[in-house]
Image (tube, grey):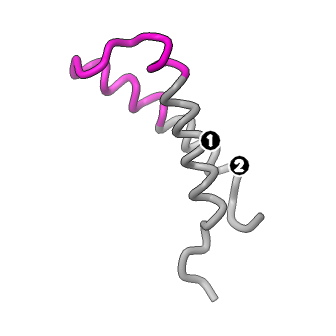
Amino acid sequence: MRGRPVLGVIFGLLFGVFFALLLQQFSIRPLDNLSVFGFPILGLLIGLALAKWAPFSRR
């Protein structure tokens, strides 16, 4: 795998957690099980997918 998958997973997880908290603070979505577990896992997967294609324009 190219790129930095560990860095992508860490920052994707942090993005998911903070996105869930942001939605809760602005009263868009309540802080329930889907928000607490779903958004961080979704962020983790997005971070891993972006890390797979990380060297976007290097060559």
Residue lying furthest bottom: 59
Where's residue 29, x and y in %?
A: 30, 19
Tags 1 and 2 touching, CB below 8 Å: yes
30 left or right, relative to 13: left
8 left or right, relative to 29: right
Indicate the quadrant where residue 52 lies: bottom right
Indicate the quadrant where residue 12 lies: top right
- Distance from disc 1 to disc 2, alpha carbons, whole Å, reads 6 Å
Residue range highlighted in magenta: 16-37
Looking at the image, is 14 positioned above or below residue 59?
Answer: above
Kind of residue indicated by mark 1: Ile
Q: Residue at x 73, y 68 (%)?
A: 2
Residue designated by label 1: 10
Q: How many marks?
A: 2
Asked whether 14 or 27 is in front, the reply is 27
Residue designated by label 2: 6
User: Are there few (<14), some (14-19), or many (20+) residues within 10 Å of tag 1?
Assistant: some
Where's residue 28, x and y in %?
A: 24, 22
Q: Quadrant of the C terminus?
A: bottom right
Asked whether 10 or 24 is in front, the reply is 24
Does residue 43 show up magenta in the picture? no
